[in-house]
Every structure is written in structure tokens, then in C-alpha cells.
Image (tube, rainbow, N blue to C red):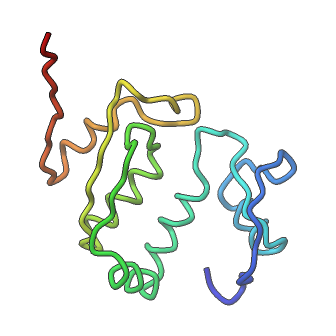
Amino acid sequence: MGKDFGNDYSVEYGNQYKFENYSSGLKQLKTDNILGSFEDNRRNFNFKLAYNIIEKSIAAQEYLKSKYSWIFIDEYQDSDMDMHRFFIKLKNELNIKLFIVGDLKQAIYLWRGAMSNIFELLENENFSFYELVTKLSL
């Protein structure tokens, strides 16, 4: 995030470290070296922060491109919009290949912002889709 932010921070999810908006979360990270979370658990501060870092930092982009040629993501049905935006940015702008696995019938995190239409959003992207089908023999 820059020289104004410390290199060492703690991750805290207690109520006292929750905040209402992104700028409050950044302020807490900068002044207290604490990475907290939004009060609304359907919003994802960590992935919003990660997205903004790679949006602004050429060094972060270059690091990710040199470190990862593929990223494998399981349980994609439990992704929220901030996670989805982050992963699609890696794919489209950093040219990191994604291998995504998921089953909408197994979505268990809708209560915390996972999107019930997440696979529909992938239809607009350049992915190959495969469906696992099994036959039961009696």
C-alpha cells in the first residue's frame, strides 16, 4: 500500500475491528496495523483491498505474473463479487490462467455475500466449461 503503511500487521475479526466503509478500513490498517473487516459480512474488505493494490501497483502486478501462471480455485460457488472481480482481473489483465471448480448446489456462504449467479457471470468470460456427469449402474 506504500510507505505510509507498516510491513507488519495483524488480522483481527472481533467486533471492535469492524468498520462501515473502505476508507475506515484503510485508516485502521494504516494507523493501527490491524486488518479488520466490514461490519456488513456480505462485503469483503480483503479482496477489495487486494484488487485495489494490483490496480495501482505495477510491482504487485509483476510479482503475481512472475509467481503464478495458473491459479486453481475450488468451491467458486462461494465467491462474492469482490473475489470474482479480483480473480477476473488476474485472468484478463495479468494473463494468469484460472482453473475454476464449483457446484452451485453446494453453495453454503450466501449469507456472507456469495453470489447465487456467480457461474452466469463466468459465461461472459473466455472459459471452457465442463460438467461432471456420473451414471449410476444398478
Quadrant into which the N terminus falls: bottom right
Residue at screen point 84% across, 71% down: 32
Please, is residue 111 above or below residue 138 in the view?
below
Report the quarter where the C terminus lies: top left
**Seen in the image, is 24 located left or right of residue 72?**
right
Closest to the observer, 43 or 107: 107
Looking at the image, residue 138 sits to the left or right of residue 16; the answer is: left
Residue at (45, 38) in percent of width and height:
78
Q: Is residue 3 left or right of residue 136?
A: right
**Residue 104 against residue 69 in the figure, above or below:** above
- x%, y% of residue 129? 14, 43
Q: Pinpoint residue 25: horizontal percent, then vertical percent.
A: 72, 60
- Give the quarter of the image for residue 77: top left
Query: Which image quarter: residue 4?
Result: bottom right
- On the image, the x and y values in percent for residue 113 come to 53, 36
Where residue 12 sits: x, y (%)?
A: 78, 57
* Residue 34 to residue 14: above or below: below
Residue at far front of view: 138
Which residue: 74% across, 83% down?
6
Q: In the image, what residue occupies the spot 19% across and 42% down?
A: 123
Extreme-right residue of the structure: 16
Report the number of discs: 0
Foreground residue among 68 and 16: 68
